[in-house]
Amino acid sequence: MLMRLLVKALRDETDRLHRNNVRLQTIGDTSALPEEVRISLHESVCKTQDNTGLTLVLALSYSGRWDLRQAVSSLVADARTGALPAGEVTDEQIADRLSTRGIPDPDLLIRSSGEFRISNFLLWQLAYTEMHITTRYWPAFRREHLYEAIGDYQARERRFGMVSEQLGSGETSKPRAVARILRGVTGT
């Protein structure tokens, strides 16, 4: 049922995504999905691949542990062939082997239903992500709740593992992406 719903959504929404300059990407083990889903996904991704506006990333058949396991396997294979000197693994080399390579780490994770866990989702990528917890269930989450989450996010000091004094100016670090997100949801 969920897979049929995904195929229907792809067929119904791909043209609109394309008209709005949205690029569609997927992360996860899509080879495990039914053929009809893989074909629809491939068509949608290909149609929108040159779009330069927002990027919509669908996590399908994805888990953070799977993603890390794939990255580690790739690193081990390179070490065995000598393409990667043993003991010289960097954060960048790991990130380049994750399914999210080329996609910025999230600035904000909105966790619905009052849960205080990340549920095996983007385990590497969420290292410095700010979290907004809401008791609302996802189907009831509306535009005003998104504004609330973004407002909460904007009020925070992004320190990326440092203390305030290490930031230098003491000013809150607010990514430029916030203004773009707000423009996208408000249409202004």
Image (cartoon, rainbow, N blue to C red):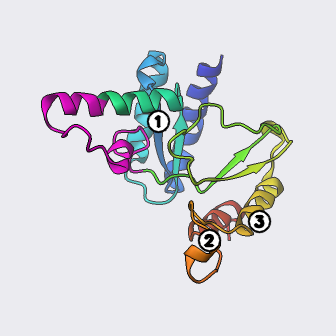
* Among the 4 quarters of the image, the one containing residue 159: bottom right
Which x, y percent locates residue 15?
A: 52, 45
In the rendered image, residue 89 lying in the magenta stretch gets the answer yes
The residue positioned 42% from the left and 55% from the top of the image is 51
Query: Disc 1 versus disc 3: distance between alpha carbons?
Result: 28 Å
Which residue was labeled with disc 1? 27
Quick one: label 3, few (<14), some, or many (20+) residues within 10 Å? few
Element assignment for label 2: loop
Q: Is residue 73 above or below residue 108?
A: above
Q: Amino acid at mark 1?
A: Ile
Which residue was labeled with disc 3? 151
User: Going by the picture, which residue comes out furthest to the bottom?
Assistant: 169
Q: Amino acid at mark 2?
A: Lys
Q: Earlier in the sequence, mark 1 or mark 2?
A: 1
Q: Are marks 1 and 2 in contact (CB under 8 Å)?
A: no
Q: Amino acid at mark 3?
A: Gly
Which residue was labeled with disc 2? 174
Element assignment for label 1: strand
Quick one: label 1, few (<14), some, or many (20+) residues within 10 Å? some
The residue positioned 35% from the left and 50% from the top of the image is 92
Q: Nearer the viewer, residue 97 or 40?
A: 97
Q: Earlier in the sequence, mark 3 or mark 2?
A: 3
Which x, y percent locates residue 26?
A: 47, 37
Query: Disc 3 versus disc 2: distance between alpha carbons?
Result: 11 Å
Q: Nearer the viewer, residue 55 or 79?
A: 79
Element assignment for label 3: helix
Q: Is residue 20 above or below residue 88?
A: below
Which x, y percent locates residue 156?
A: 71, 67
Q: Find the magenta span and give its range.
A: 74-102
The residue positioned 55% from the left and 49% from the top of the image is 127
